[in-house]
Amino acid sequence: MLRVDISKQLGDFHIEARFESAGRVTGLFGASGAGKTSLINMIAGLLRPDRGFIAIDGETLDDTTANLHVPAHRRRIGYVFQDARLFPHLDVRHNLDYGRRMNRLADDPIQRAHVTELLDIARLLDRRPGQLSGGERQRVALGRALLLKPRLLLLDEPLGSLDDERKVEILPYLIRLRDEASVPMVYVSHDAGEMRQLATDIVMLSRGRVTASGGVEALPGSLGSMVSARG
Amino acid sequence: MAIQLSLRVAAVATLVATPLGIAVGWILARRDFWGKSLLDALIHLPLVLPPVVTGYLLLLTLGRRGLVGAWLADHLGIVFAFRWTGAALACGIMAFPLLVRPIRLSIEAVDRRLEQAAGTLGAAPWQVFSTITLPLALPGVLAGMVLGFAKAIGEFGATITFVSNIPGETQTISSAVYSLIQTPDGDTAALRLVVVSIIIALAALIASEWFARRALQRLHGN
């Protein structure tokens, strides 16, 4: 269960968002500039809210009334960035292993084998990020975040920098990941089609505010949203 | 003798100044605080002050009768004045601005988004520094070390003012050449030292180029 109730001023832009979600994949949906990335940066602990709280499964990560802010590195929240952000000086193997090393987790060959198989990256292990295609990079970034054994996985438009062909290449991996239900996800996108395929719950964001939330029927163009628009 | 001493003085000056240079370079690149431009100016001061002035200031503070120097000698038995360690200190201070600058620039060039990513993967700030920032800034650190070493090995004014020109103790290549060209038959010996200086300088430049290229290759992940 993810609970968010925050406000944050960023220059001229104001974010005031409140939602709860217990879904396997919470789709954070909105046009670009709606504040989606700022919102998940706050969930990740990279950005500190001016006011409010963030909690996961009953554990409070931010609470401005108690002056509580758990720093990003103690949150155990996996984050897959739009631009992958693989470490260029490390090969794929060491990129994948980074979270485990930093958190001093015991080696888990079974999980590692499972993740490399799931994402089909076994043959990339000795390469450097510079030698990978965009789609491969994004799969490695996903694997890196999963091997952290996170309690929540944030995906910020992970398909955003890929062309349509590559999107089709990655999407099945994400769907497999969802159906294994090993870790809850927050999936950020402005693409209603992607959302419909992936999300179990929707939070709609517009100009820094939550305008709707619920099941995938809340997405624009769905039958449900047309009914609610009429009603 | 002067060659060996110069190499030792420059090597010690560079090795001691490097960790300090990395720390200062990081602070200047990544922190904003009151007095930052003052710190920046202080570090660059030896670059613009006449070297003799820097050497004289060192003599005043760290000389045997200097405020700090007397205390160090009485309490810790550390003496810089007229010792090769004093030459290393003078060279280190003179080389410091040249050492810090490339380090600072290369740290500024490290993508902060990579540091953020490391944070989300559980790396505490010091771990982010040691596993991401520093390895990625390595070419700049090496460049700074080479520049610093080159400056240290050629330093003359501050060194001769602070620790004088004692053969075997503080007479580096520069001060040896200076002495030799003032001696009637010193030309040949001076020229020999000149050739050695050129060889050392060329070797340092070629080595740094090689290190920088290797480091860059590593960074671009190819």
Image (cartoon, rainbow, N blue to C red):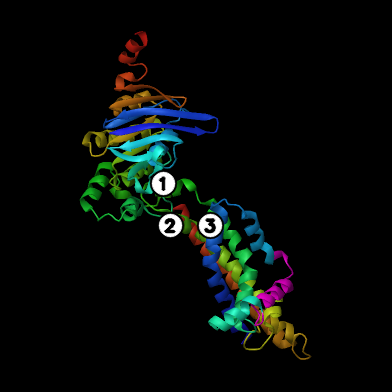
Query: Which mark is in front, 1 or 3?
Result: 3
| Above or below: residue B89 compared with residue A147 | below
Callout 3: chain: B
Q: Which numbered marker is on residue B117?
A: 1
Residue at mark 2: B126
Callout 2: chain: B
Q: Is residue A154 magenta?
A: no
The span shown in magenta is: B47-65
Q: Position of residue A143 (x, y in %)?
A: 31, 45
Q: Position of residue B174 (x, y in %)?
A: 69, 79
Q: Amino acid at mark 3?
A: Trp
Residue at mark 3: B26
Q: Position of residue B34 (x, y in %)?
A: 60, 52
Q: Both on one chain, marks 1 and 3?
A: yes
Q: Residue furthest top?
A: A230
Q: Position of residue B36 (x, y in %)?
A: 61, 54
Disc on the earlier residue, 3 or 2: 3
Residue drawn at x 38%, y 45% as measured from the top left: A70
Query: Which mark is in front, 1 or 2?
Result: 2
- Mark 1 secondary-structure assignment: helix
